Amino acid sequence: MEVFVQLLANTLQIGSVYVLFALGLTLIFGVMKIVNFAHGAFFTAAALVVTSVMPFATATLGLSLPASYLLAAIAAFAVVLCIGAVVFSFGFQYVLKDLNGSFILSIGLLLVLNGIYLAIYGGAPRSVPQVLPDTINIFGARLTEQRLALVIIAIVVTGGLYLLIERTRLGLALRAVAQDQEAAMLQGMPYRRVALSGFLIGAALAACAGVLMAPINAVTTVSGDEFLIKAFIIIIIGGLGSVAGAIVGGLFIGMVESVGGYFFDPSTATLAMFILVIAFLLVRPQGILGNAD
Amino acid sequence: MSEDTTILSVEGLCVSYHGVPALQDVSLAIRRGAITSIVGSNGAGKTTLMKAIAGLLVPDRGSVRFCGKDIGGRTPAETVRSGITLVPEGRRLFAQMSVRDNLMTGAYIRSDRAAIEADFETVLGYFPVLRERLGTPARALSGGQQQMLAVGRALMAAPRLVMLDEPTIGLAPAVVDTIAEIIETISRNGAEVLLVEQNAHMALELAAHAYVMENGRIVLSGSGRELMDSDLVRKAYLGL
Protein backbone atom coordinates (compact mmCIF):
# COMPACT_ATOMS: atom_id res chain seq x y z
CA MET A 1 0.00 0.00 0.00
CA GLU A 2 2.72 2.44 1.01
CA VAL A 3 4.71 1.68 -2.11
CA PHE A 4 1.62 1.95 -4.27
CA VAL A 5 0.65 5.34 -2.84
CA GLN A 6 4.21 6.58 -3.09
CA LEU A 7 4.45 5.54 -6.73
CA LEU A 8 1.07 7.11 -7.46
CA ALA A 9 2.23 10.36 -5.85
CA ASN A 10 5.46 10.27 -7.85
CA THR A 11 3.55 9.54 -11.05
CA LEU A 12 1.22 12.49 -10.48
CA GLN A 13 4.07 14.82 -9.62
CA ILE A 14 6.27 13.94 -12.59
CA GLY A 15 3.32 13.42 -14.91
CA SER A 16 1.56 16.68 -14.14
CA VAL A 17 4.56 18.74 -15.22
CA TYR A 18 4.88 16.63 -18.37
CA VAL A 19 1.19 17.22 -19.07
CA LEU A 20 1.58 21.00 -18.87
CA PHE A 21 4.66 20.96 -21.06
CA ALA A 22 3.22 18.57 -23.64
CA LEU A 23 -0.11 20.44 -23.77
CA GLY A 24 1.71 23.55 -24.94
CA LEU A 25 3.64 21.66 -27.58
CA THR A 26 0.56 19.86 -28.87
CA LEU A 27 -1.55 23.05 -28.86
CA ILE A 28 1.06 24.87 -30.94
CA PHE A 29 1.24 21.92 -33.32
CA GLY A 30 -2.54 21.76 -33.62
CA VAL A 31 -3.07 25.42 -34.38
CA MET A 32 0.05 26.23 -36.40
CA LYS A 33 0.94 22.79 -37.81
CA ILE A 34 4.53 23.29 -36.77
CA VAL A 35 6.80 21.38 -34.43
CA ASN A 36 8.44 23.81 -32.03
CA PHE A 37 11.85 22.44 -31.03
CA ALA A 38 12.45 25.62 -29.06
CA HIS A 39 9.55 24.83 -26.70
CA GLY A 40 11.97 23.73 -23.98
CA ALA A 41 13.58 27.18 -24.12
CA PHE A 42 10.33 28.71 -22.79
CA PHE A 43 10.49 26.33 -19.83
CA THR A 44 14.15 27.15 -19.23
CA ALA A 45 13.59 30.91 -19.46
CA ALA A 46 10.81 30.75 -16.86
CA ALA A 47 12.84 28.59 -14.47
CA LEU A 48 15.93 30.81 -14.84
CA VAL A 49 13.93 33.99 -14.21
CA VAL A 50 12.57 32.42 -11.02
CA THR A 51 16.11 31.63 -9.85
CA SER A 52 17.20 35.23 -10.30
CA VAL A 53 14.07 37.08 -9.14
CA MET A 54 13.43 35.01 -6.00
CA PRO A 55 16.77 35.66 -4.24
CA PHE A 56 16.55 39.33 -5.27
CA ALA A 57 13.00 39.65 -3.86
CA THR A 58 13.82 38.00 -0.55
CA ALA A 59 17.24 39.64 0.00
CA THR A 60 16.85 43.11 -1.50
CA LEU A 61 13.10 43.73 -1.27
CA GLY A 62 12.73 41.82 1.97
CA LEU A 63 9.65 39.93 0.81
CA SER A 64 8.50 36.68 2.36
CA LEU A 65 9.23 33.43 0.54
CA PRO A 66 5.71 32.94 -0.88
CA ALA A 67 5.50 36.60 -1.96
CA SER A 68 8.86 36.50 -3.68
CA TYR A 69 7.90 33.24 -5.44
CA LEU A 70 4.70 34.88 -6.66
CA LEU A 71 6.63 37.90 -7.89
CA ALA A 72 9.14 35.61 -9.60
CA ALA A 73 6.31 33.69 -11.27
CA ILE A 74 4.79 36.92 -12.63
CA ALA A 75 8.18 38.02 -13.95
CA ALA A 76 8.75 34.60 -15.52
CA PHE A 77 5.41 34.69 -17.38
CA ALA A 78 6.09 38.24 -18.56
CA VAL A 79 9.53 37.32 -19.90
CA VAL A 80 8.30 34.16 -21.63
CA LEU A 81 5.32 35.89 -23.22
CA CYS A 82 7.66 38.62 -24.51
CA ILE A 83 10.05 36.04 -25.97
CA GLY A 84 7.05 34.25 -27.46
CA ALA A 85 5.63 37.38 -29.06
CA VAL A 86 9.04 38.32 -30.50
CA VAL A 87 9.84 34.90 -31.98
CA PHE A 88 6.32 34.68 -33.42
CA SER A 89 6.44 38.12 -35.03
CA PHE A 90 9.94 37.79 -36.45
CA GLY A 91 9.94 34.07 -37.14
CA PHE A 92 7.08 31.65 -36.69
CA GLN A 93 4.40 33.66 -38.44
CA TYR A 94 6.33 33.19 -41.68
CA VAL A 95 6.51 29.40 -41.36
CA LEU A 96 2.90 28.61 -40.42
CA LYS A 97 1.97 25.13 -41.68
CA ASP A 98 5.54 24.70 -42.94
CA LEU A 99 7.12 21.69 -41.24
CA ASN A 100 10.57 22.06 -42.82
CA GLY A 101 10.76 25.81 -42.32
CA SER A 102 9.60 25.62 -38.71
CA PHE A 103 12.04 22.78 -38.04
CA ILE A 104 15.00 24.87 -39.22
CA LEU A 105 13.74 28.01 -37.49
CA SER A 106 13.00 26.39 -34.13
CA ILE A 107 16.27 24.40 -34.00
CA GLY A 108 18.19 27.59 -34.76
CA LEU A 109 16.17 29.50 -32.21
CA LEU A 110 16.86 26.83 -29.59
CA LEU A 111 20.61 27.20 -30.15
CA VAL A 112 20.44 30.99 -30.02
CA LEU A 113 18.32 31.07 -26.86
CA ASN A 114 20.45 28.45 -25.11
CA GLY A 115 23.52 30.50 -26.01
CA ILE A 116 21.93 33.64 -24.58
CA TYR A 117 20.96 31.84 -21.37
CA LEU A 118 24.50 30.50 -21.02
CA ALA A 119 25.99 33.94 -21.56
CA ILE A 120 23.72 35.46 -18.91
CA TYR A 121 23.60 32.71 -16.31
CA GLY A 122 26.70 30.58 -16.88
CA GLY A 123 26.76 26.81 -16.77
CA ALA A 124 26.42 26.15 -13.03
CA PRO A 125 23.12 24.67 -11.76
CA ARG A 126 21.00 27.19 -9.90
CA SER A 127 18.46 26.50 -7.20
CA VAL A 128 15.89 28.34 -5.09
CA PRO A 129 14.44 27.35 -1.71
CA GLN A 130 11.16 25.48 -1.58
CA VAL A 131 8.24 27.65 -0.53
CA LEU A 132 6.48 24.76 1.20
CA PRO A 133 9.29 22.51 2.48
CA ASP A 134 7.21 20.51 4.97
CA THR A 135 6.50 16.87 4.33
CA ILE A 136 3.13 15.27 4.73
CA ASN A 137 2.14 11.65 5.10
CA ILE A 138 -0.60 10.15 2.98
CA PHE A 139 -1.21 6.46 3.81
CA GLY A 140 2.42 6.16 4.81
CA ALA A 141 3.77 7.72 1.63
CA ARG A 142 5.86 10.85 2.04
CA LEU A 143 5.34 13.87 -0.13
CA THR A 144 6.57 17.43 0.29
CA GLU A 145 3.85 20.05 0.33
CA GLN A 146 5.70 21.78 -2.50
CA ARG A 147 5.15 18.78 -4.74
CA LEU A 148 1.53 18.44 -3.65
CA ALA A 149 0.96 22.11 -4.46
CA LEU A 150 2.58 21.53 -7.86
CA VAL A 151 0.13 18.74 -8.66
CA ILE A 152 -2.86 20.81 -7.56
CA ILE A 153 -1.76 23.83 -9.60
CA ALA A 154 -1.12 21.65 -12.64
CA ILE A 155 -4.59 20.12 -12.36
CA VAL A 156 -6.19 23.57 -12.03
CA VAL A 157 -4.25 24.93 -15.02
CA THR A 158 -5.12 21.89 -17.13
CA GLY A 159 -8.77 22.25 -16.16
CA GLY A 160 -8.65 25.94 -17.01
CA LEU A 161 -7.14 25.18 -20.40
CA TYR A 162 -9.87 22.62 -21.05
CA LEU A 163 -12.57 25.21 -20.26
CA LEU A 164 -10.80 27.78 -22.42
CA ILE A 165 -10.71 25.42 -25.38
CA GLU A 166 -14.21 23.98 -25.00
CA ARG A 167 -16.22 26.92 -23.71
CA THR A 168 -14.82 30.21 -25.03
CA ARG A 169 -14.90 32.01 -28.33
CA LEU A 170 -11.11 31.88 -28.58
CA GLY A 171 -11.23 28.14 -27.85
CA LEU A 172 -13.75 27.68 -30.65
CA ALA A 173 -11.42 29.50 -33.03
CA LEU A 174 -8.40 27.47 -31.85
CA ARG A 175 -10.26 24.22 -32.47
CA ALA A 176 -11.62 25.37 -35.81
CA VAL A 177 -8.20 26.51 -37.05
CA ALA A 178 -6.65 23.23 -35.90
CA GLN A 179 -9.22 21.18 -37.80
CA ASP A 180 -9.50 23.15 -41.05
CA GLN A 181 -7.69 26.43 -41.31
CA GLU A 182 -9.27 27.56 -44.58
CA ALA A 183 -12.79 26.74 -43.37
CA ALA A 184 -12.04 28.67 -40.16
CA MET A 185 -11.03 31.71 -42.23
CA LEU A 186 -14.32 31.42 -44.13
CA GLN A 187 -16.13 31.84 -40.78
CA GLY A 188 -14.30 35.14 -40.31
CA MET A 189 -11.60 33.88 -37.98
CA PRO A 190 -8.35 35.83 -38.40
CA TYR A 191 -5.86 32.97 -38.79
CA ARG A 192 -2.70 34.81 -37.83
CA ARG A 193 -4.19 36.29 -34.65
CA VAL A 194 -5.61 32.94 -33.61
CA ALA A 195 -2.24 31.30 -34.29
CA LEU A 196 -0.49 33.93 -32.15
CA SER A 197 -2.95 33.31 -29.31
CA GLY A 198 -2.38 29.55 -29.51
CA PHE A 199 1.39 30.07 -29.60
CA LEU A 200 1.37 32.34 -26.54
CA ILE A 201 -0.91 29.99 -24.58
CA GLY A 202 1.50 27.14 -25.44
CA ALA A 203 4.48 29.23 -24.33
CA ALA A 204 2.67 30.16 -21.10
CA LEU A 205 2.06 26.48 -20.36
CA ALA A 206 5.78 25.77 -20.73
CA ALA A 207 6.49 28.76 -18.49
CA CYS A 208 4.05 27.40 -15.91
CA ALA A 209 5.91 24.06 -15.91
CA GLY A 210 9.23 25.91 -15.53
CA VAL A 211 7.96 28.04 -12.64
CA LEU A 212 6.61 24.96 -10.85
CA MET A 213 9.79 22.92 -11.31
CA ALA A 214 12.31 25.63 -10.36
CA PRO A 215 12.02 25.08 -6.56
CA ILE A 216 12.08 21.29 -6.98
CA ASN A 217 14.96 20.58 -9.35
CA ALA A 218 18.16 22.50 -9.87
CA VAL A 219 17.89 24.69 -12.96
CA THR A 220 20.46 24.79 -15.75
CA THR A 221 20.41 26.60 -19.07
CA VAL A 222 19.31 23.39 -20.80
CA SER A 223 16.74 22.17 -18.25
CA GLY A 224 13.88 22.47 -20.68
CA ASP A 225 15.48 20.36 -23.40
CA GLU A 226 15.11 17.21 -21.34
CA PHE A 227 11.40 17.94 -21.09
CA LEU A 228 11.20 18.47 -24.83
CA ILE A 229 12.33 14.91 -25.57
CA LYS A 230 9.85 13.53 -23.04
CA ALA A 231 7.14 15.74 -24.49
CA PHE A 232 7.74 14.34 -27.98
CA ILE A 233 7.43 10.84 -26.56
CA ILE A 234 4.21 11.87 -24.80
CA ILE A 235 2.53 13.37 -27.84
CA ILE A 236 3.53 10.43 -30.04
CA ILE A 237 1.97 8.06 -27.53
CA GLY A 238 -1.01 10.28 -26.71
CA GLY A 239 -1.71 11.48 -30.24
CA LEU A 240 -0.28 14.56 -31.97
CA GLY A 241 -2.52 17.60 -31.63
CA SER A 242 -4.83 15.96 -29.09
CA VAL A 243 -5.35 17.71 -25.74
CA ALA A 244 -6.72 14.57 -24.08
CA GLY A 245 -3.83 12.63 -25.61
CA ALA A 246 -1.27 14.96 -24.02
CA ILE A 247 -2.89 14.43 -20.61
CA VAL A 248 -3.10 10.64 -20.93
CA GLY A 249 0.40 10.42 -22.45
CA GLY A 250 1.92 12.73 -19.83
CA LEU A 251 0.55 10.73 -16.92
CA PHE A 252 1.50 7.48 -18.65
CA ILE A 253 5.13 8.55 -19.13
CA GLY A 254 5.18 9.87 -15.56
CA MET A 255 4.11 6.41 -14.45
CA VAL A 256 6.70 4.61 -16.58
CA GLU A 257 9.37 6.87 -15.15
CA SER A 258 8.39 6.53 -11.49
CA VAL A 259 7.50 2.84 -11.53
CA GLY A 260 10.43 1.89 -13.77
CA GLY A 261 12.75 4.01 -11.66
CA TYR A 262 11.54 2.35 -8.47
CA PHE A 263 11.67 -1.32 -9.51
CA PHE A 264 14.63 -1.07 -11.87
CA ASP A 265 16.59 2.14 -12.36
CA PRO A 266 16.08 5.47 -14.18
CA SER A 267 18.01 4.43 -17.28
CA THR A 268 15.82 1.35 -17.66
CA ALA A 269 12.78 3.60 -17.43
CA THR A 270 14.19 5.85 -20.17
CA LEU A 271 14.96 2.84 -22.32
CA ALA A 272 11.38 1.59 -21.80
CA MET A 273 10.04 4.94 -23.05
CA PHE A 274 11.96 4.75 -26.28
CA ILE A 275 10.88 1.15 -26.83
CA LEU A 276 7.28 2.27 -26.25
CA VAL A 277 7.64 5.05 -28.81
CA ILE A 278 9.01 2.64 -31.40
CA ALA A 279 6.19 0.20 -30.64
CA PHE A 280 3.58 2.95 -30.99
CA LEU A 281 5.03 4.23 -34.24
CA LEU A 282 4.91 0.70 -35.65
CA VAL A 283 1.50 -0.36 -34.34
CA ARG A 284 -0.54 2.79 -33.72
CA PRO A 285 1.25 5.78 -35.25
CA GLN A 286 -1.69 8.12 -34.55
CA GLY A 287 -1.27 7.50 -30.80
CA ILE A 288 -3.87 6.53 -28.23
CA LEU A 289 -6.27 9.41 -28.88
CA GLY A 290 -5.03 10.84 -32.17
CA ASN A 291 -7.09 10.94 -35.32
CA ALA A 292 -5.97 8.81 -38.22
CA ASP A 293 -7.27 11.39 -40.73
CA MET B 1 -27.78 48.08 -64.41
CA SER B 2 -27.87 50.61 -61.61
CA GLU B 3 -26.02 50.36 -58.33
CA ASP B 4 -29.12 50.09 -56.18
CA THR B 5 -30.32 46.85 -57.76
CA THR B 6 -26.85 45.30 -57.92
CA ILE B 7 -25.47 43.95 -54.67
CA LEU B 8 -22.28 42.36 -55.98
CA SER B 9 -20.48 43.19 -59.18
CA VAL B 10 -17.37 41.57 -60.54
CA GLU B 11 -15.51 43.40 -63.31
CA GLY B 12 -12.76 41.99 -65.51
CA LEU B 13 -11.52 39.56 -62.86
CA CYS B 14 -8.37 37.59 -63.69
CA VAL B 15 -6.92 34.97 -61.36
CA SER B 16 -4.03 32.60 -62.01
CA TYR B 17 -2.38 29.74 -60.17
CA HIS B 18 1.40 29.92 -60.51
CA GLY B 19 1.09 31.77 -63.81
CA VAL B 20 -1.58 29.47 -65.24
CA PRO B 21 -4.75 31.50 -65.80
CA ALA B 22 -7.83 30.13 -64.05
CA LEU B 23 -10.16 33.09 -64.53
CA GLN B 24 -9.95 35.38 -67.55
CA ASP B 25 -11.76 38.68 -67.63
CA VAL B 26 -14.80 37.48 -65.69
CA SER B 27 -17.59 40.00 -65.16
CA LEU B 28 -20.92 39.37 -63.53
CA ALA B 29 -23.54 41.05 -61.40
CA ILE B 30 -25.78 39.77 -58.65
CA ARG B 31 -29.07 41.60 -58.33
CA ARG B 32 -31.04 42.09 -55.18
CA GLY B 33 -33.93 39.81 -54.40
CA ALA B 34 -33.19 37.02 -56.82
CA ILE B 35 -31.08 33.89 -57.02
CA THR B 36 -28.10 34.01 -59.36
CA SER B 37 -26.59 30.78 -60.66
CA ILE B 38 -23.34 29.87 -62.33
CA VAL B 39 -23.17 26.59 -64.18
CA GLY B 40 -20.23 24.97 -65.85
CA SER B 41 -18.29 21.74 -65.95
CA ASN B 42 -15.50 20.68 -63.64
CA GLY B 43 -12.48 22.93 -63.96
CA ALA B 44 -14.39 25.79 -65.57
CA GLY B 45 -13.26 28.14 -62.81
CA LYS B 46 -16.42 28.30 -60.72
CA THR B 47 -14.72 27.44 -57.43
CA THR B 48 -11.85 29.79 -58.23
CA LEU B 49 -14.36 32.60 -58.72
CA MET B 50 -16.01 31.83 -55.35
CA LYS B 51 -12.64 31.78 -53.60
CA ALA B 52 -11.61 35.08 -55.19
CA ILE B 53 -14.84 36.76 -54.04
CA ALA B 54 -14.41 35.27 -50.54
CA GLY B 55 -10.87 36.68 -50.31
CA LEU B 56 -9.10 33.33 -50.25
CA LEU B 57 -7.38 34.11 -53.57
CA VAL B 58 -5.85 37.38 -54.60
CA PRO B 59 -6.86 38.39 -58.14
CA ASP B 60 -4.25 39.52 -60.66
CA ARG B 61 -6.61 42.13 -62.12
CA GLY B 62 -10.18 43.28 -61.92
CA SER B 63 -12.48 44.47 -59.19
CA VAL B 64 -15.09 43.06 -56.85
CA ARG B 65 -17.64 45.53 -55.54
CA PHE B 66 -20.12 44.65 -52.80
CA CYS B 67 -22.91 47.08 -51.89
CA GLY B 68 -21.02 49.73 -53.80
CA LYS B 69 -17.73 49.23 -51.95
CA ASP B 70 -14.58 47.80 -53.48
CA ILE B 71 -13.78 44.62 -51.53
CA GLY B 72 -10.94 43.40 -53.78
CA GLY B 73 -7.85 42.37 -51.80
CA ARG B 74 -9.72 41.98 -48.50
CA THR B 75 -8.92 39.06 -46.23
CA PRO B 76 -11.50 36.28 -45.85
CA ALA B 77 -12.25 37.52 -42.32
CA GLU B 78 -12.96 41.04 -43.59
CA THR B 79 -15.11 39.67 -46.40
CA VAL B 80 -17.22 37.68 -43.92
CA ARG B 81 -17.61 40.77 -41.77
CA SER B 82 -18.81 42.76 -44.75
CA GLY B 83 -21.64 40.24 -45.17
CA ILE B 84 -20.51 37.56 -47.65
CA THR B 85 -20.31 33.90 -46.64
CA LEU B 86 -19.26 30.91 -48.67
CA VAL B 87 -20.51 27.36 -48.27
CA PRO B 88 -17.40 25.75 -49.71
CA GLU B 89 -17.16 22.83 -52.05
CA GLY B 90 -16.91 19.61 -50.07
CA ARG B 91 -18.68 21.32 -47.12
CA ARG B 92 -15.47 21.66 -45.06
CA LEU B 93 -17.15 21.14 -41.71
CA PHE B 94 -15.12 20.91 -38.52
CA ALA B 95 -15.36 17.14 -38.43
CA GLN B 96 -14.59 16.58 -34.76
CA MET B 97 -16.78 19.39 -33.46
CA SER B 98 -20.40 18.90 -32.50
CA VAL B 99 -23.20 20.15 -34.71
CA ARG B 100 -23.83 22.94 -32.19
CA ASP B 101 -20.19 24.09 -32.20
CA ASN B 102 -20.07 23.97 -35.99
CA LEU B 103 -23.07 26.29 -36.11
CA MET B 104 -21.45 28.57 -33.52
CA THR B 105 -18.29 28.92 -35.63
CA GLY B 106 -20.54 30.52 -38.23
CA ALA B 107 -21.51 33.19 -35.70
CA TYR B 108 -17.86 33.86 -34.76
CA ILE B 109 -17.90 37.42 -36.10
CA ARG B 110 -21.04 38.35 -34.16
CA SER B 111 -21.51 39.39 -30.55
CA ASP B 112 -25.25 40.04 -30.49
CA ARG B 113 -26.18 37.08 -28.30
CA ALA B 114 -29.95 37.38 -28.54
CA ALA B 115 -29.87 37.65 -32.33
CA ILE B 116 -27.45 34.72 -32.58
CA GLU B 117 -29.83 32.65 -30.47
CA ALA B 118 -32.72 33.65 -32.72
CA ASP B 119 -30.77 32.71 -35.86
CA PHE B 120 -29.78 29.42 -34.23
CA GLU B 121 -33.49 28.62 -33.84
CA THR B 122 -34.21 29.74 -37.42
CA VAL B 123 -31.50 27.45 -38.79
CA LEU B 124 -32.80 24.52 -36.73
CA GLY B 125 -36.25 25.38 -38.07
CA TYR B 126 -34.90 25.02 -41.62
CA PHE B 127 -33.20 21.74 -40.77
CA PRO B 128 -35.13 20.01 -37.95
CA VAL B 129 -33.00 16.89 -38.34
CA LEU B 130 -30.02 18.84 -36.96
CA ARG B 131 -31.84 19.67 -33.75
CA GLU B 132 -31.83 16.01 -32.75
CA ARG B 133 -28.10 15.78 -33.38
CA LEU B 134 -26.73 18.94 -31.78
CA GLY B 135 -24.20 17.03 -29.68
CA THR B 136 -23.08 14.71 -32.47
CA PRO B 137 -19.69 15.29 -34.11
CA ALA B 138 -20.12 16.53 -37.67
CA ARG B 139 -18.20 13.59 -39.10
CA ALA B 140 -20.92 11.20 -37.84
CA LEU B 141 -23.65 12.89 -39.92
CA SER B 142 -24.89 11.60 -43.27
CA GLY B 143 -23.84 13.46 -46.41
CA GLY B 144 -27.17 15.26 -46.65
CA GLN B 145 -27.11 16.29 -42.99
CA GLN B 146 -23.54 17.53 -43.42
CA GLN B 147 -24.61 19.72 -46.31
CA MET B 148 -27.49 21.09 -44.26
CA LEU B 149 -25.05 21.84 -41.45
CA ALA B 150 -22.70 23.60 -43.87
CA VAL B 151 -25.55 25.80 -45.12
CA GLY B 152 -26.73 26.39 -41.55
CA ARG B 153 -23.23 27.40 -40.47
CA ALA B 154 -23.06 29.98 -43.27
CA LEU B 155 -26.46 31.40 -42.25
CA MET B 156 -25.27 31.82 -38.65
CA ALA B 157 -23.12 34.72 -39.84
CA ALA B 158 -26.34 36.60 -40.73
CA PRO B 159 -24.98 37.19 -44.25
CA ARG B 160 -26.32 39.52 -46.91
CA LEU B 161 -24.93 37.27 -49.64
CA VAL B 162 -24.60 33.50 -49.40
CA MET B 163 -22.46 31.74 -51.98
CA LEU B 164 -23.01 28.01 -52.31
CA ASP B 165 -20.40 25.96 -54.14
CA GLU B 166 -21.82 22.66 -55.42
CA PRO B 167 -24.24 22.18 -52.51
CA THR B 168 -25.99 19.13 -54.00
CA ILE B 169 -23.04 17.13 -55.27
CA GLY B 170 -23.31 13.48 -54.32
CA LEU B 171 -26.65 13.86 -52.54
CA ALA B 172 -29.77 11.73 -52.92
CA PRO B 173 -32.56 13.36 -55.01
CA ALA B 174 -34.81 13.85 -51.98
CA VAL B 175 -32.04 15.73 -50.16
CA VAL B 176 -31.36 17.81 -53.28
CA ASP B 177 -35.01 18.91 -53.15
CA THR B 178 -34.64 19.89 -49.48
CA ILE B 179 -31.54 21.95 -50.24
CA ALA B 180 -33.29 23.59 -53.20
CA GLU B 181 -36.25 24.56 -51.01
CA ILE B 182 -33.96 26.03 -48.39
CA ILE B 183 -32.10 28.04 -51.02
CA GLU B 184 -35.40 29.56 -52.12
CA THR B 185 -36.33 30.24 -48.50
CA ILE B 186 -33.02 31.99 -47.84
CA SER B 187 -33.60 34.16 -50.89
CA ARG B 188 -37.18 34.95 -49.86
CA ASN B 189 -36.02 35.89 -46.37
CA GLY B 190 -33.85 38.65 -47.69
CA ALA B 191 -30.34 37.32 -48.28
CA GLU B 192 -28.95 37.17 -51.80
CA VAL B 193 -27.90 33.78 -53.13
CA LEU B 194 -25.14 32.92 -55.58
CA LEU B 195 -25.46 29.27 -56.50
CA VAL B 196 -22.69 27.40 -58.27
CA GLU B 197 -23.68 24.01 -59.59
CA GLN B 198 -22.84 21.20 -61.95
CA ASN B 199 -26.47 20.20 -61.54
CA ALA B 200 -27.51 22.70 -64.20
CA HIS B 201 -31.13 21.69 -64.17
CA MET B 202 -31.63 22.66 -60.54
CA ALA B 203 -29.42 25.74 -60.74
CA LEU B 204 -31.26 27.16 -63.76
CA GLU B 205 -34.68 26.35 -62.42
CA LEU B 206 -34.02 28.35 -59.25
CA ALA B 207 -32.18 31.24 -60.85
CA ALA B 208 -33.63 34.52 -62.01
CA HIS B 209 -30.32 35.19 -63.69
CA ALA B 210 -27.60 32.75 -64.63
CA TYR B 211 -24.15 32.51 -66.19
CA VAL B 212 -22.37 29.69 -67.98
CA MET B 213 -18.63 29.34 -67.42
CA GLU B 214 -16.17 27.48 -69.60
CA ASN B 215 -12.37 27.46 -69.36
CA GLY B 216 -12.23 30.36 -66.93
CA ARG B 217 -14.56 32.64 -68.91
CA ILE B 218 -18.22 33.55 -68.84
CA VAL B 219 -19.53 32.31 -72.18
CA LEU B 220 -23.25 32.91 -71.81
CA SER B 221 -25.63 34.75 -69.54
CA GLY B 222 -29.34 35.35 -69.31
CA SER B 223 -32.38 34.44 -67.29
CA GLY B 224 -32.57 30.88 -66.03
CA ARG B 225 -35.31 30.11 -68.54
CA GLU B 226 -33.39 31.58 -71.49
CA LEU B 227 -30.34 29.51 -70.66
CA MET B 228 -32.40 26.35 -70.26
CA ASP B 229 -33.67 26.86 -73.78
CA SER B 230 -30.28 27.68 -75.31
CA ASP B 231 -28.66 25.06 -77.50
CA LEU B 232 -25.31 25.26 -75.67
CA VAL B 233 -26.83 24.54 -72.28
CA ARG B 234 -29.24 21.91 -73.56
CA LYS B 235 -26.43 19.96 -75.22
CA ALA B 236 -23.59 20.40 -72.77
CA TYR B 237 -25.27 20.60 -69.37
CA LEU B 238 -28.76 19.21 -69.55
CA GLY B 239 -27.98 16.27 -71.82
CA LEU B 240 -30.93 16.97 -74.09
Image (cartoon, rainbow, N blue to C red):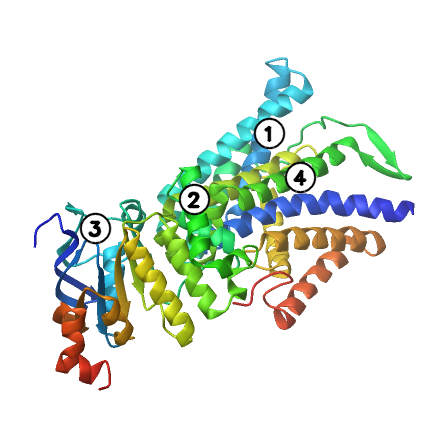
Mark 2 or mark 3, whichever is nearer to me:
2
Which residue shows up at 20% across the image and 48% down it?
B71
The chain containing the residue under callout 1 comes to A
Query: Is residue B114 rendered to the left or right of residue A26?
Result: left
First along the sequence among labels 4 and 1:
1
Give the percent coordinates (x, y) of residue B95. Answer: 49, 61
Q: Are marks 4 and 1 on the same chain?
A: yes
- In the figure, B184 relative to A61: above or below? below
Q: Secondary structure at mark 4?
A: helix
First along the sequence among labels 2 and 3:
3
The chain containing the residue under callout 4 comes to A
**What amino acid type is highlighted by mark number 2?**
Ala
Q: Which residue is mark 2?
A: B118
Q: Which residue is mark 4?
A: A154
Give the percent coordinates (x, y) of residue B158. Answer: 34, 47
Tag 1–tag 3 contact (CB < 8 Å): no
**What amino acid type is highlighted by mark number 4?**
Ala
- In the figure, B184 relative to A165: above or below? below
Which residue shows up at 27% across the image and 60% down it?
B51
Q: Secondary structure at mark 3?
A: loop
- C-alpha span from label 2 to label 1: 50 Å
**What amino acid type is highlighted by mark number 3?**
Gly
Q: Which residue is mark 1?
A: A50
Which residue shows up at 45% across the image and 68% down it?
B144
Which residue shows up at 42% across the image and 57% down it?
B126
Tag 2–tag 1 contact (CB < 8 Å): no
Q: Which residue is mark 3?
A: B73
Q: Taking the image as drawn, is residue A178 in sight?
A: yes
Q: Taking the image as drawn, is residue A91 in sight?
A: no
Q: Are marks 2 and 1 on the same chain?
A: no
Q: Nearer the viewer, residue A91 or A168?
A: A168
